[in-house]
Image: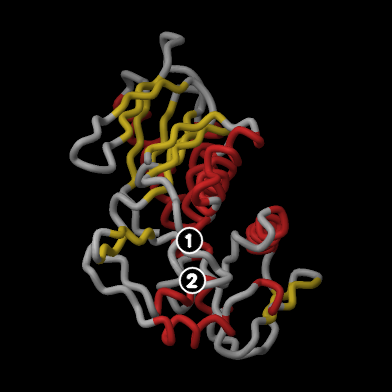
Amino acid sequence: MGSPCEVQVDCADAALSARIGAVIEAEARRIETKFSRYLPESVVGKINTMAGAPLALDPEARLLIDYAAHCHAISDGLFDITSGILRKAWTFDGSDRVPDERRVADLLPLVGWGKTRWQNGTLTLRPGMEIDLGGIAKEYAVDMAVARARAECDVPVLVNFGGDLCVTGPRANGGRWRVLIDAVYQQAASAWLEIDSGAITTSGDARRFVERAGRRYSHILDPRTGMSIVGAPRAVTVAASTCIEAGVLSTLAMLQGAHCETFLEQEGVTAWVIR
């Protein structure tokens, strides 16, 4: 997942804080090792090299694939874990390199969850297709880390993986945790949010984008066209009961483009949008 892991333990016991931090880091590394698309021996790595052959998955992997399939269904196909292969055309490094439309078109036959076979815990991709759980695995890791922290002790803990965060509950004095949301461009001010339960995630183009002729292209792509979503806000921050729920909602909101705010209002989501 490649995101910095930050743990805040609201406890004066240094030994306990260190133990909780170690437990959370171990859980983060376990999930990254298991689900990173960059590791050939991970579950995702194995799926992506099966070349059309089926692969039976363990219960935890089934859980994530089932959730991804559910997100695909409720988003009318906008949330699609097979769209990661479009990275072969796009490199969101802040440059002005927008891919040739023909290169994108060549990859589109390999995009589409409906082209896979997912049945009884066994996944089969068409040859050349890949999956990428980047849209849910980091958030899942945060939730699992929080669960491990709760199992370890009852002191308040905040877990933050690259801006996606969750807390076990209020601080030791009953107060809220203060979270700084970075500005997405120079003219904007950073903002402080307060949280005493649940999770907060942010989706946006602050770090992953390309820009040409005055247009900024976000890394959040429409799987139907392979192109950056038109009219998307610069950033969407969402609060929800779990990190994986907040992450999917913030991504889905970005995928709505110009209709982002309407989507969030219809869903009754607590959110902050920057355009």
Nearer the observer, 60 or 186: 186
Q: Residue at coordinates 38% horizontally, 38% vertically from top-left? A: 274
Q: Residue at coordinates 39% horizontally, 21% vertically from top-left? A: 177
Q: Which mark sits nearer the N-terminus, 2 or 1?
A: 2
Q: Quadrant of the C terminus?
A: top left
Dot 1 corresponds to which residue?
134
Q: Residue at coordinates 39% horizontally, 61% vertically from top-left? A: 219
Mark 1 surroundings: few (<14), some (14-19) or many (≥20) residues within 10 A: some
Colouring rule applied to residues? secondary structure
Q: In what element is the residue under mark 2?
A: helix
* Residue type of the residue flagged with mark 1: Gly
Nearer the observer, 16 or 267: 267
* Residue type of the residue flagged with mark 2: Gly
Q: Is residue 197 above or below residue 232?
A: above
Where residue 178 sits: x, y (%)?
A: 35, 22
Where residue 73 sits: x, y (%)?
A: 72, 58
Q: Is residue 122 left or right of residue 112?
A: right
Where residue 171 sits: x, y (%)?
A: 42, 17
Asked if disc 2 and disc 1 are in contact, CB closer than 8 Å, the reply is yes
